[in-house]
Image: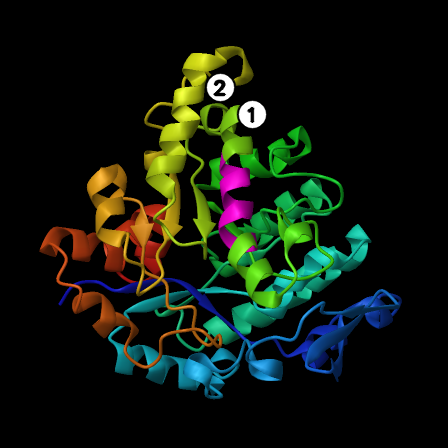
Amino acid sequence: MSLVIDADGHVEEDMDALRARLPDDLRDLAPVWLGDKDGRVQYALEGRVWTGRYPYPGGMKNHVSAGGERREGGKDPKVRLAVLEDEGIDAAVLFPSTGLLFGLLERADVANACCVAYNDLLAEYCASDPSKLVGVALLPQQDPALAAAELERCVHQYDFVAGVMRPNRIGGRTVDDPAFDVLYETADRLDAPIMLHEAYNSGMDTVGVDRMVSYAGCHIISHPFEQMTAMVSLTLAGVFQRFPQLRIGFFEAGCGWAPTWADRIEEHFELAPDDFLGGDPKGVLNTRSYVTFELEEPGLGSTCEQGWADNVCFASDYPHFDAVYPGAVKSVKERQLPADVEEKILGLNALTLYGPRLARLIGR
């Protein structure tokens, strides 16, 4: 049987448990779910009320109801392990859900405390079976130094295999800001990739949503546009060249755009070489960056054929509303891709992305 790694699954945070772990003076500033207003999610954040601009298509169950039905595996690790067994998944690398909202926090100390509490809770979830449930550290990108410290803590204390932050501008900084060098240096030294993961949240600085007038428009735009923008910015800033082991994931945005986008970036080196601080990017992006594919995405085969077969990973997105469940792995196998390509995208590429730490955890 081929190795199958879910390179991007999610957990469902217990926000009450998270707040209980915060320092007394910060507890009232953490995100608190208030309910919904005409189907739009409402949270209190640092004493401010945040209301989603548009209703979620899955309502209040948007992030806990794979296939449109409530799924408990996001919060119950025993259920999650049964899901992995049923789906034929050997291990799942786990990302936040509500935690992706922490970019709306303005105070770095609040964001850091929330990320620390989240990561501690995730470690407890993964402890149910560390060979199958694997953590990614949520990073407080409002302060790059704190983000670097939290990545180091989670790698050493919990064997987490990567750090995750948003591709968006957070705290006034885009991901190419020199202030993030301390984080990229830490990730490079630890051999732990940095995962950029988008999620549409109104009120967060997001490329293109100012032109949209619906949830669908914002969601369509936000995921690929933010990742494409981040890829350009990091390449122009020479981040890959300055940190030679650093691998970066541009996740939950599909894969079909990657070959054409990388080609467009590389072509511009000929037009404006002085704009590329790391020099010629030829061959960098399809060896050092990784993407995931939508399970029904028509461009998957073409993407692999265009030099990205080693850098596309399988992701279930479980337990989110639009996740394919049950049958995610089955749907990939039914595509009848070449055997070597199927083997890579279902597991081997994720093993390369997350590195020796993941291989050790899952016994490979």
Residue 188 highlighted magenta (yes or no): no
- Disc 1 target residue: 237
Q: Residues within 10 Å of mark 2 (few under 14, many from 20)?
A: some
**Residue ID at (27%, 45%):** 303
Q: At 54% from the left edge and 74% from the top edge, which residue is drawn?
A: 124
Judge left or right: residue 110 versus residue 176: right
Asked whether, in this view, residue 71 is left or right of residue 325, the answer is: right
Tell me if residue 80 comes above or below residue 298 in the rendering: below
In what element is the residue under mark 2? loop
Q: Which residue is mark 2?
A: 278
Q: Quadrant of residue 198?
A: bottom right
x then y, percent, for residue 248: 45, 42
Height in image: 204 above or below 193?
Answer: below
- Kindly give the residue lying farthest to the top in the view shown: 274
Disc 1 to disc 2, C-alpha distance: 7 Å
- Quadrant containing the N terminus is bottom left
Query: What amino acid is found at the position of numbered circle 2 in the picture?
Result: Gly
The type of residue carrying mark 1 is: Ala
**237 sits left or right of 79 in the view:** right
Q: Is residue 228 magenta?
A: yes
- Which residues are drawn in magenta? 222-231
* Res 156 seen here: no
Q: Is residue 205 visible to the viewer in this orientation of the structure?
A: yes
Predominant secondary structure, magenta span: helix
1 and 2 marks in contact (CB < 8 Å): yes
Q: Residue at x 67, y 63 (%)?
A: 101
Q: Is residue 154 found left or right of 161 in the rendered image?
A: right
For this rendering, which residue is in front, 279 or 114?
279
Q: Position of residue 63 (x, y in %)?
A: 54, 76
Q: Residues within 10 Å of mark 1 (few under 14, many from 20)?
A: some
Picture coordinates of residue 164 (x, y %)?
55, 53
